[in-house]
C-alpha cells in the first residue's frame, strides 16, 4: 500500500553546498518553522478547541512520554472525516510528521506519539450504529474504547457480543490493528476475523490529495482491509470507522481463582496443567480463560479468569461442568478477593468484571441505568484501568507452542518470580490460542489460492 507521506520530515537534498546556504537563509531571514506554520494553519482552519499545544496528555507508557524526550508540538482532535482530511492535508503540505492515537496511547512501540510533530487524536469520533436483523453489522467510530463498546453492545436489543480485551481504556482502533485477542477467542476468533469493512482516509498519489474510501472484503480496496485486519497501524491510512459482524450475547459463567503458593516447582506445574487443559481438543470452544501473573517490589499476584458461554436458552450446566473440571485439574482455586469464584451473569457484566470493574458495574445493569449513571461508572472503570497496573514496564508479546515441557515452563516462571522482576516489575498474561483463534477466515475475495484474508501473522 502507498505510504501516504505522513512521515516526511524535510525537503529533498540536492548535491553541493547550495542547499545548505538556501536552508540556512530560510531559517535566518524568514524564520520559517514548518511545525509552527502547520499549527497556525490548523488553528485557523479547524473549529475552536480542536488544536491543543499545552498540557498534552502523554501516552500511557512513560517510556514514550515527554519525560523521556518525546514531546508532540500539538494534538488535533477532529470531529468528523472532513476535519481529518483537512488536518492531514495541512501537515502533508508543511511536511510535518503525524502520529495517530485512538485511545490514551497503549501502543507497545509508541505509535501514538511523535516528537515535535502532530498527534491526531481520534477520541471524538465515537459513532455507534447497528444495522441488520439476525445478522448484525456494528459501525464503531475509531475513538471508542473497550468499556464503551462493551456497554453499547450490551444496551442493544438484543444484547450483542464483542470479543474485546481486559483493559477499559484501550482504543478500539489500536485493538483491531493488532488483531484483537480475547478470552472469547476460542469461540469467535480474533476481533479482525469478523471485521467486514472500514472507512479509511488515504493519500491518493494520482490526485495528490487525501480522501475517504471504504475498504471491504471484496467490492473495493480489499488490500486496504487486509492491512486493517491485524497489520498494525500508523503507516497506510487513518481509520475513521470499523464495521464488525457481531453476534447475539448469551449468559455466561464467570470464574476466577488464584495461586498463593509461589514455590517455583509448584507454580510451574500448575501453569503447565493450565496450558494443557485449555489446549486439549475435548475442552469446548465455549470455554476461554486467561492466566495472569506478576511480581513487583509491592506485590506478587497470580490469577486466572474464565468465561464460558451458556446455551442460547440460558442453560449453564455444561459450562459448570467444564469450569469445575478446569479448577480441579489446575488447582488454581484460591480466592482472588476482587473477582467472583464462580457466578452466572450477563456477558456485558462479565466483561466489566474481567476488566476489574465488576464492583462499579451499574447496579441496575447497563440496559436500565440512566445515561449519567453509565457515564459515571465507565469513567470509574477507566480510572481503575489506568491505576491497576504499573505501565512503566516494557510491554512485549511472546508466542509459545502449546506443548512446552515442564522444564521450559519452569524457566519462564522462574524468570517472573526471580530477583530482576521483583526489583523492576514484571507482568505476564497467558492467552491460549485455540479453536477459532487458529483458523484464518475465508470471507474475502482472494486472487490466488492460499492467500490470507487477514494480515495477522501469528497463527
Image (spheres, rainbow, N blue to C red):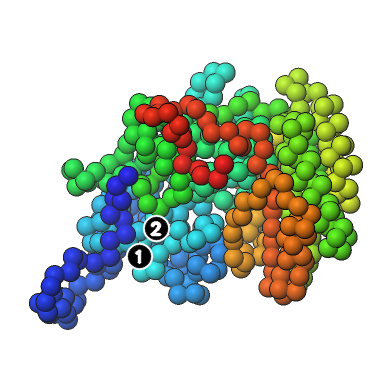
Q: In this rendered view, identify the residue nearer to me: 155 or 404.
A: 404
| Label located before the other in sequence (2 or 1) | 2
Give me the residue at 82% from left, 47% from top.
273
Q: Quick check: 333 left or right of 124? A: right
Cα distance between the residues tagged 2 and 1 = 8 Å
Give me the residue at 52% from left, 30% from top.
441
**Rendered image quadrant of residue 6:** bottom left
Callout 2 crowding tier (Cα within 10 Å): few <14, some 14–19, many ≥20: many
Callout 1 crowding tier (Cα within 10 Å): few <14, some 14–19, many ≥20: many
Give me the residue at 28% from left, 54% from top.
5
Q: Which residue is mark 2?
A: 99
Give me the residue at 35% from left, 26% from top.
219
Residue 116 position (above or below residue 271)? below
Q: Which residue is mark 1?
A: 117
Q: Quick check: 295 left or right of 16? A: right
* Residue 77, position as x, y percentages in the image: 40, 53
* Residue 387, position as x, y percentages in the image: 67, 61
Residue 321 position (above or below residue 230)? above
- Is residue 129 visible to the viewer in this orientation of the structure? no
* Residue 116, position as x, y percentages in the image: 36, 69
Local secondary structure at mark 2: strand
Local secondary structure at mark 1: loop
Q: Quick check: 15 left or right of 329? A: left
Amino acid at each position: 500500500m502507498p505510504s501516504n507521506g505522513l512521515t516526511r520530515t524535510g525537503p529533498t537534498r540536492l548535491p553541493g553546498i547550495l542547499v545548505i546556504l538556501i536552508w540556512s537563509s530560510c531559517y535566518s531571514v524568514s524564520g520559517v518553522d514548518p511545525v509552527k506554520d502547520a499549527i497556525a494553519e490548523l488553528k485557523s482552519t479547524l473549529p475552536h478547541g480542536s488544536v491543543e499545544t499545552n498540557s498534552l496528555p502523554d501516552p500511557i507508557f512513560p517510556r514514550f512520554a515527554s519525560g523521556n524526550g518525546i514531546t508532540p508540538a500539538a494534538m488535533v482532535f477532529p470531529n468528523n472525516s472532513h476535519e481529518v482530511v483537512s488536518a492531514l492535508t495541512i501537515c502533508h503540505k508543511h511536511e510535518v510528521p503525524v502520529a495517530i492515537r485512538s485511545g490514551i496511547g497503549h501502543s507497545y512501540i509508541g505509535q501514538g506519539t511523535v516528537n515535535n510533530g502532530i498527534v491526531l487524536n481520534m477520541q471524538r469520533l465515537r459513532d455507534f450504529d447497528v444495522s441488520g436483523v439476525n445478522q448484525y453489522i456494528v459501525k464503531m467510530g475509531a475513538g471508542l474504547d473497550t468499556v464503551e463498546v462493551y456497554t453499547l453492545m450490551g444496551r442493544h436489543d438484543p444484547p450483542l457480543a464483542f470479543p474485546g480485551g481486559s483493559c477499559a481504556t484501550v482504543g478500539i482502533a489500536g485493538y483491531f490493528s493488532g488483531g484483537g485477542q480475547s478470552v472469547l477467542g476460542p469461540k469467535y476468533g480474533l476481533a479482525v476475523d469478523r471485521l467486514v469493512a472500514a472507512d479509511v482516509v488515504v493519500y491518493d498519489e494520482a490526485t495528490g490529495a487525501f480522501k475517504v474510501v471504504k475498504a471491504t472484503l471484496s467490492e473495493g480496496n480489499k488490500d486496504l482491509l487486509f492491512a486493517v485486519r491485524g497489520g498494525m497501524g500508523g503507516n497506510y491510512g487513518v481509520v475513521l470507522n470499523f464495521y464488525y459482524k457481531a453476534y447475539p450475547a448469551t449468559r455466561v459463567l464467570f470464574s476466577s481463582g488464584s495461586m498463593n503458593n509461589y514455590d517455583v516447582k509448584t507454580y510451574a506445574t500448575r501453569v503447565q496443567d493450565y496450558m494443557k487443559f485449555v489446549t486439549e481438543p475435548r475442552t469446548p470452544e465455549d470455554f476461554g480463560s486467561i492466566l495472569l501473573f506478576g511480581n513487583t517490589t509491592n506485590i506478587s499476584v497470580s490469577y486466572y479468569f474464565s468465561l464460558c458461554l451458556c446455551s442460547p436458552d440460558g442453560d449453564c450446566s455444561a459450562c459448570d461442568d467444564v469450569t469445575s473440571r478446569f479448577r480441579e485439574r489446575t488447582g488454581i482455586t484460591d480466592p482472588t478477593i476482587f473477582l467472583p469464584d464462580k457466578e452466572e451473569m450477563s456477558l456485558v457484566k462479565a466483561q466489566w468484571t474481567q476488566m476489574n470493574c465488576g464492583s462499579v458495574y451499574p447496579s441496575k445493569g447497563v440496559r436500565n441505568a440512566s445515561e449519567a449513571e453509565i457515564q459515571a461508572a465507565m469513567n470509574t472503570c477507566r480510572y481503575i484501568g489506568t491505576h491497576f497496573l504499573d505501565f512503566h514496564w516494557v510491554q512485549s508479546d511472546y508466542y509459545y507452542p502449546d506443548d512446552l515441557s515442564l522444564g521450559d515452563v519452569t524457566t519462564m516462571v522462574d524468570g517472573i518470580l526471580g530477583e530482576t522482576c521483583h526489583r523492576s516489575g514484571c507482568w505476564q498474561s497467558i492467552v491460549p490460542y485455540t479453536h477459532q483463534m487458529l483458523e484464518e477466515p475465508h470471507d474475502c475475495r482472494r486472487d490466488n489460492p492460499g492467500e490470507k484474508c487477514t494480515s495477522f501473522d501469528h497463527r
